[in-house]
Image: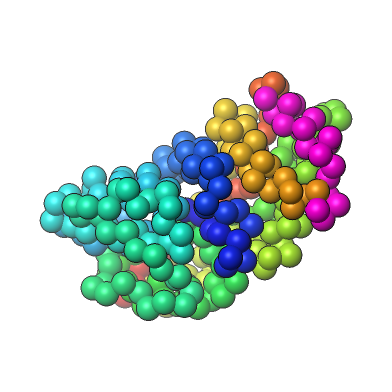
Amino acid sequence: MDEHDTDHGYLLDNQQSEAGVRFGALSELFDPVTFRHVDQLGIAAGMRCWEVGAGGPSVPLGLAERVGSAGAVIATDIDVSWARDIAGGVIEVLRHDVAADPPPPGGFDLVHARLVLVHVTDRTEALRRMVQALRPGGWLLLEDADPGLQPLLCPDESGPEQRLANRLRSGFRALMAALGADLAYGRTLPRLLREAGLEDVQADAYFPITSPACAVLEAATVRQIRRRLVAEGLATDGEIDRHLANVATGRLDLATAPMISAWGRRP
């Protein structure tokens, strides 16, 4: 679920305390969308699932509920700091780099990655390995952001607080792009799944506005990248303090980038 440590070129470090806050907010925002798709794909008792870039625990735990004691959930990430405690029973947690390491053995009925590939430099190879891991008839469900489709933190830019928020969000995007993130990746997912040979490809998109979890996510994210924003001259400490205070009022209508979900089946 998500962004990983800076040793691998990622902006948001799972070792920081704010990462747990971010994972909680992402779970609140996007788990209902993810599991709506998982359930539509028929993931049920006895199936094997690979959760790529698990980050926090919520998606592996939800998958484990669905596959039951006869199934298996392999949760992998290059940093398993926030998922290692859920290992046991049907859940196995592995440190793993999806773009460099062989897929876990055994074949899977579902391979899922949420908000992962946009941050992976060799995302083409990562996608190839995920497709390779599918059993015949297995589903690949990819969910990734597309900040290029909707780049604003405050779509209703009605005053100085909103303009400051959008400027800081622009700085965040600049930092991501400098580390190799593809800010237009989400929209390419349906085509990429078809080109990978998958069938029955479909997609949809979702982005919340004015959820309390959006404010929690924004505050935690800004605190994580604060030093980088200042060091790169993208914001001053005073501007960041003012923005965090504005977010804390609850009066900003904050949004996320659209999350595009795309799924396809291996023949």
**Residue 175 rendering spot, x and y as whole percentages:** 73, 57
**Residue 210 rendering spot, x and y as whole percentages:** 62, 29
Q: Is 264 or 32 nearer to us in this picture?
A: 32
Residue 246 is inside the magenta segment: yes
Left or right: 222, with 90 as reference point: right
Does the image show residue 228? yes
Residue 61 is inside the magenta segment: no
Q: Residue at x 60, y 71 (%)?
A: 121
Q: Quadrant of the C terminus?
A: bottom left
Does the image show residue 263? no
Most extreme residue toward the left is: 70
Left or right: 258, with 151 as reference point: left
**Residue 224 rendering spot, x and y as whole percentages:** 64, 46
Which residue range is magenta in the image? 231-248
Q: Residue at x 52, y 51 (%)?
A: 15
Q: Residue at x 32, y 55 (%)?
A: 41
Q: Is residue 125 above or below residue 191?
A: below
**Residue 259 rendering spot, x and y as whole percentages:** 56, 50
Left or right: 206, with 60 as reference point: right
- Indicate the colouring scheme: rainbow
Q: Quadrant of residue 266?
A: bottom left
Left or right: 64, with 237 as reference point: left
Q: Is residue 72 above or below residue 150?
A: below
Q: Residue at x 72, y 31 (%)?
A: 244
Dominant SS in magenta: helix
Marks counted in the figure total: 0
Q: Is 226 or 106 nearer to us in this picture?
A: 226
Q: Is residue 49 above or below residue 267?
A: above
